[in-house]
Image (spheres, rainbow, N blue to C red):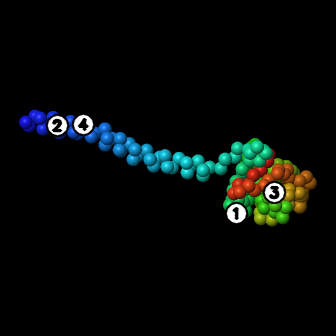
Amino acid sequence: RREFMNWVGFGALATSLPVAIAACQSDTATPEAETEPAAETAELDDTPDADGFAAIGTVTELDEGTIAKQNFKGEQVAVVRAAEGVVAVNTLCTHQGCTVKWDGEAFACPCHGSNFFADGTVATGPASEPLGTYEAKIDGDRVLVKI
Ligand code: FES
């Protein structure tokens, strides 16, 4: 009789073991599945839309001052809000190629002091040519630029 009870006890344990393992596996897999979509939505998709505009940043970033990228589709670009609306310029100074930065009122060059208005035109030299510009617009929470 004792041998029979040992055999039955072992059989019950062997039968329930796969269920216990499966339960543990499903518990560990669930949190990973829940975190993956959140990570994907946090990253901004800069694939160009059908009209050629691509997302360079968000309206929230723009409202903090400027969106500046050293390499956006191969160009150095800054986007600001101005009287004209949303403006995107190439931040390569037309004097000798330093990178201009938005100071809240103008794009200022740190090398020889040129300043450019938000639309890229020259405010003060020595630069004599305007900054390059790009089409820009807002779509929902995305700020889009067409390179
Ligand atoms: Fe900008 Fe000279 S490179 S002013």
Q: How much space separates mark 2 and mark 3, taking CA atoms?
A: 79 Å
Q: Nearer the viewer, mark 1 or mark 2?
A: 2
Q: Nearer the viewer, mark 2 or mark 4?
A: 2
Q: Could you say whether the residue bearing mark 2 is in a helix, strand or loop?
A: helix
Residue visible at 89% across and 58% down in the picture: 122
Q: Residues within 10 Å of mark 1 (few under 14, many from 20)?
A: few
In the image, is the residue at mark 3 within 8 Å of ligand 1 by its beta carbon? no
Q: Nearer the viewer, mark 1 or mark 4?
A: 4
Residue visible at 26% across and 37% down in the picture: 15
Amino acid of disc 1? Glu
Q: Position of residue 94 (x, y in %)?
A: 86, 50
Label for residue 14? 4
Q: Nearer the viewer, mark 2 or mark 3?
A: 2
Left or right of 95, for residue 19: left
Q: Which residue is mark 3?
A: 87
Q: How much space separates mark 1 and mark 4, taking CA atoms?
A: 62 Å
In the image, is the residue at mark 4 within 8 Å of ligand 1 by its beta carbon? no
Is residue 50 or residue 60 the one in the foreground? 50
- Which numbered disc, 3 or 4, marks the residue that appears first in the sequence? 4
- Which numbered disc, 1 or 3, marks the residue that appears first in the sequence? 1
Q: Which residue is mark 1?
A: 64
Q: Quadrant of the N terminus?
A: top left
Q: How much space separates mark 2 and mark 4, taking CA atoms?
A: 10 Å
Q: Which residue is mark 2?
A: 8
